[in-house]
Image (cartoon, rainbow, N blue to C red):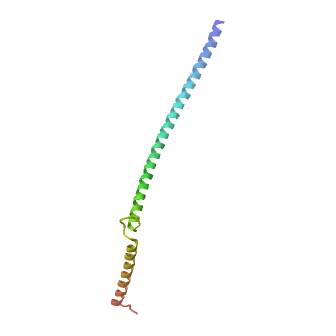
């Protein structure tokens, strides 16, 4: 009877060892998954930091361009006045028109 009891206890011991090994295997798998999740979160945080820096840089560049444009159109202090810019454009168009007419005086059409 003792030998039968020893065999049952050995069987239970083997089953316990097998289940313990299964649990240990699952624990290793969970540790691996946790490590992978942590690495992925760190990569995403790094990507978000880079995106934030890029948008911040773009925002400051856009603000600087806006300040330059307002100075160029005379909207801010120290800028070229808007009427002067319009005058330059009209003068350039008028100069091109006069040169066009003068060139036709020297080279008349063939008809």
Viewport quadrant of the N terminus: top right
The residue lying furthest to the front in this view is 77
Residue at (56, 23) in percent of width and height: 21
Q: Which quadrant would residue 79 be assigned to in this image?
A: bottom left
In this image, 29 relative to 3: left or right? Answer: left
Task: Name the foreground residue: 56 vs 45.
Answer: 56
The residue lying furthest to the left in this view is 106
Q: Is residue 85 above or below residue 62?
A: below
Q: How many marks?
A: 0
Task: Name the foreground residue: 77 vs 52.
Answer: 77
Q: Position of residue 108 (x, y in %)?
A: 36, 91
Residue at (38, 67) in percent of width and height: 72
Q: Position of residue 55 (x, y in %)?
A: 45, 52
Q: Position of residue 90 (x, y in %)?
A: 39, 78
In this image, 47 relative to 99: left or right? Answer: right
Q: Is residue 26 above or below residue 93?
A: above
Q: Is residue 106 above or below residue 19?
A: below
Viewport quadrant of the C terminus: bottom left
Task: Name the foreground residue: 11 vs 46.
Answer: 46
């Amino acid at each position: 009877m003792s030998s039968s009891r020893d065999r049952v206890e050995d069987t239970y011991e083997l089953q316990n060892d097998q289940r313990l090994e299964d649990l240990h295997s699952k624990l290793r798998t969970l540790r691996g998954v946790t490590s992978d999740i942590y690495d992925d979160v760190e990569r995403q945080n790094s990507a978000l930091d880079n995106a934030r820096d890029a948008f911040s840089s773009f925002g400051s560049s856009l603000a600087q361009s806006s300040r330059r444009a307002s100075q160029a159109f005379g909207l801010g202090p120290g800028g070229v006045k808007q009427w002067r810019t319009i005058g330059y454009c009209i003068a350039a168009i008028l100069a091109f028109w006069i040169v066009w007419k003068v060139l036709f005086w020297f080279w008349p059409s063939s008809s």
